[in-house]
Image (cartoon, rainbow, N blue to C red):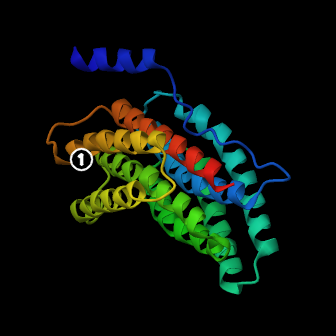
Amino acid sequence: MKKVLMILFLALFGTIDALEIRPLKENATLTDVFNTNCLQMTQSQQMLKAYIMKGLNSNFDNPNKNLKKAIPLYDKRFLDIKRYFQTKLKDKEAIEAFNKAQKIWNESKEILEKNPTKEGALKLKENFEQMTPLLLRGSKPLANEGLELLTTTGKLCRDPMKITIDYLLRIWGVDIPNYESDVKNIIEDFHKNLDKLTQNSHNTPKTLKLLEKSKMGFKFFEMMYRSKTAKIPSLLSRKADENFKIIREIKKEYKSNLK
């Protein structure tokens, strides 16, 4: 009965549209492109989560519809971001990083467009773990202290998402090597980056309040990791998306102060 009530509550709460990212404008600034590149890294995790939810036969937040909409938009933004950085960069390694990332994305896109399988989910998890550092490497030569702040903020999005994905994979019956140590490292990473952001000079009362909100929300993921009771996939998905919205608000505040 409790599970039914929880699902009804989540349904009434409404969808979050966490897969929505605005397209880049033709006159986008470096800060705009850098921020969108960071959001893309998190959105790859969002698409993997939607893929797994489909594999679990969950219609919560309509993962099939979201994926169909997100994949082509992600693809276009990826090419726009790559073109922007490669046009401005002289660093050969950075240029090559985007080329390697595109090969990984093209392979991942084909997997995302097919019916979900456990093998496909593990391959996507591996691919996106390889792709994120390449996207960071490709943009790093143009980064400054303020833009690095956006990068750190993005990690607060991805850490809860990674824990959620691993947990959903286990519910699906997928064996994840080194699960315990990986999650412990993710939890430590979250708190390290949270402390770093809390101490930065670009904070406002609003960002500090949002950072505290994210910290409190992360307790759910720590509790989930330690709990021996199985959680509802829709609740896990919703909690990860809620954190994503909080962090996007923080990034929006930081971004406005960087202009």
Q: Residues within 10 Å of mark 1 (few under 14, many from 20)?
A: some
Q: Which amino acid type is shown beneath numbered disc 1?
A: Glu
Q: Is residue 244 visible?
A: yes
Quarter residue 18 falls in:
top right
- Viewer-closest of 55 and 168: 168
Position of 22 with respect to 129 (left or right) is right
- Viewer-closest of 201 and 240: 201
- Viewer-closest of 95 and 120: 95
Q: Where residue 221 sits: x, y (%)?
A: 28, 44
Q: Is residue 111 visible?
A: no
**Residue at the bottom extreme?**
92
Q: Is residue 174 above or below residue 16?
A: below
Residue at 53 percent of width and 29 percent of height: 62
Q: Where residue 251 sits: x, y (%)?
A: 55, 48
- Viewer-closest of 212 and 82: 212
Q: Where residue 151 sits: x, y (%)?
A: 53, 61
Q: Is residue 231 above or below residue 200?
A: above
The C terminus lies in quadrant:
bottom right
The N terminus lies in quadrant:
top left
Q: Which residue is mark 1?
A: 222
Residue at 38 percent of width and 30 percent of height: 234
**Residue at the right extreme?**
26
Q: Is residue 85 above or below residue 244?
A: below
For mark 1, give the secondary structure.
Answer: helix
Q: Where residue 216 sits: x, y (%)?
A: 29, 40
Please tell me how many numbered marks the rendered image carries: 1
Quarter residue 86 falls in:
bottom right
Residue at 56 percent of width and 57 percent of height: 41
Residue at 68 percent of width and 73 percent of height: 142
Position of 144 with respect to 211 (left or right) is right
